[in-house]
Amino acid sequence: MSSAEAVPARFERPSLVSLAFSIFVIWFILYSLKGAGFSVSAFLEGLPRMGELLDDMFPPDVSRISSIWKALLETFQMALAGTVLGVSLSLPLGVLASRTQSPGKITYTLARLLVSFCRTVPNLVWALFFVATVGLGTFAGTLTIIVDTVGFCGRFFAEGIEEIDRGPEEALKAIGAGPLAVLCCAVFPLALPSFVNSALFSLEKAVRSSVVLGLVGAGGIGVELKVAMDMFRYSEAATIILSIFVLVIVVERLSAAIRKQLL
Amino acid sequence: MSAKVALKQNHIQQHLAVKRADLKVCNLKKSFSGKEILRDVSFKICSEEAVSLIGANGSGKSTLIRCCLRLIEPDGGRLEFFGQDLMLANQRGLRKIRSKVGFVSQKHNLVPRLSVLSNVLHGALAYQRSPRLWFQGFAPSVLREKAMHCLELVGLQDFGSRRADHLSGGQSQRVAIARALMQQPEFIIADEPVASLDPQAGDEVMELFVSLVRKEKITLLFSSHNLDHAIKYSDRILGLRNGEIEIDTASSGQSAFTLRGFYE
Ligand SMILES: Nc1ncnc2c1ncn2[C@@H]1O[C@H](COP(=O)(O)OP(=O)(O)O)[C@@H](O)[C@H]1O
Ligand SMILES: [Mg+2]
């Protein structure tokens, strides 16, 4: 029966350490649900209230639709301008932050650190910082989106650059072309699809986050939404939410179409 | 100084110029993670000579060729192009020497999203720093015409506006050759230039390549695993084995049959 012995057991017997670790993880997840204030009863009690709120929202109130559209346009402009400026900054930063193109170890590390810092600090924190320094309004929002875009695109541009075929780059280096020419003639054209992809994702992200930024006073449609909610004008809030929904969908569709065209 | 002596000196200089060593490689060494690929490589290539480099797969032909241009940094040894020391050159000096040496590799290494014309124009980056060369649309018309002429030499004058990734393997390699000609180099190094093509296209492209190089009086070093190509297209054959040049012989009178023993 030696052949039967060769079949591995269906389950491996866990070691004592991994067993203890698994128990700890499960306990911590349950403990976190408590820490998160998760309560089924509170949710059930809140259900009728949610129903009432939805009821208040419908039918949506379109009396202020023109100022809502204006705020919506402002939000989109904030997102677009912030993304374009952020992408322009990300391009050189992405080069410096890529293992393959960075001129030196120190520039590489510094660029990486800067990009990580932009990314890891949440954008609401950036928004609060800019509202406190440059004041309420869309400029604070635009600055936030620039930083957010640098955090996102800086990283993905660098990765896009690291992933390209090194052959064309070598071909130009071999004939003595300068570093800038090598970047513009070989590296960027090869990384372009990846750049466009990241930039479009970044724009979608910016549109979504620029909505939230208004909640802390950084301009755009979020301000309107906060005012409507604070003044219990739920039917107007419904119009605003639906408009945001339309904007986000339109931008996502557009960027999908551009992506398909270019890639 | 009498006219006669001057004439004689002139004659000697001309003679020296013809015999000048374009590339000198002395005791070149290169290891990859402790494994010695090039142990002690020395050879010379004279002006207007065509030299082939043969050797088994993995014998280090590509490594040697890349080391010659310092695309891979050698561990030791000396390199001289046109009498200038490549190992001592700074970045600028290195670029200056490289600009006189064309490089054609096994993969065509064209930039896929750009047009064929843009790719050929990039050959001029060796001697023109202007950003106008980055994209054919902005390039000076003199250079555009010159690039078209180079395309004509390789028989692809009708493909200028085609995207580089919409070409066959043979066509791509011919564009790479046009790019090298655009550079107006004094020397071309080619690493198995036709190894990625089927035998017939390989023969055609090799024939075209070598005839253009000979016509322009460009010195040539090419590696090949095709012994017939090595014999037919070069004046001299270098054989690389165990990290050293074990064969250095005129190619006339050689047969593929006798050379095959070299691989055993
Ligand atoms: N960058 C590298 N890192 C480590 N080993 C390498 C590298 N490049 C080449 N080698 C090794 O060096 C040897 C010679 O390679 P190569 O020069 O490409 O040979 P050939 O061109 O003659 O086929 C091979 O064994 C290869 O694995
Ligand atoms: Mg090789």
Image (cartoon, rainbow, N blue to C red):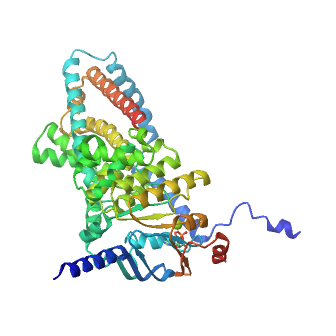
Say how many tags the image has.
0
Residue at image location 38% in from the left, 53% down from the top? B179
Q: Is residue A226 visible?
A: no
Quadrant of the rendered image containing residue A54 = top left
Residue B183 lies, in percent from the top left, at 33, 57
Residue located farthest toward the right when viewing the structure as drawn: A1
| Nearer the observer, A183 or A241 | A183
Using residue A197 as the reference point, say whether residue A132 is left or right of it: left
Q: Is residue B180 above or below residue B239?
A: above
Q: Is residue B12 above or below residue B94?
A: below
Residue B80 lies, in percent from the top left, at 34, 77
Q: Is residue A112 above or below residue B259?
A: above
| Nearer the observer, A72 or A173 | A173
| Nearer the observer, B9 or B183 | B9
Residue at image location 22% in from the left, 79% down from the top? B4
Q: Quadrant of the C terminus of chain A?
A: top left
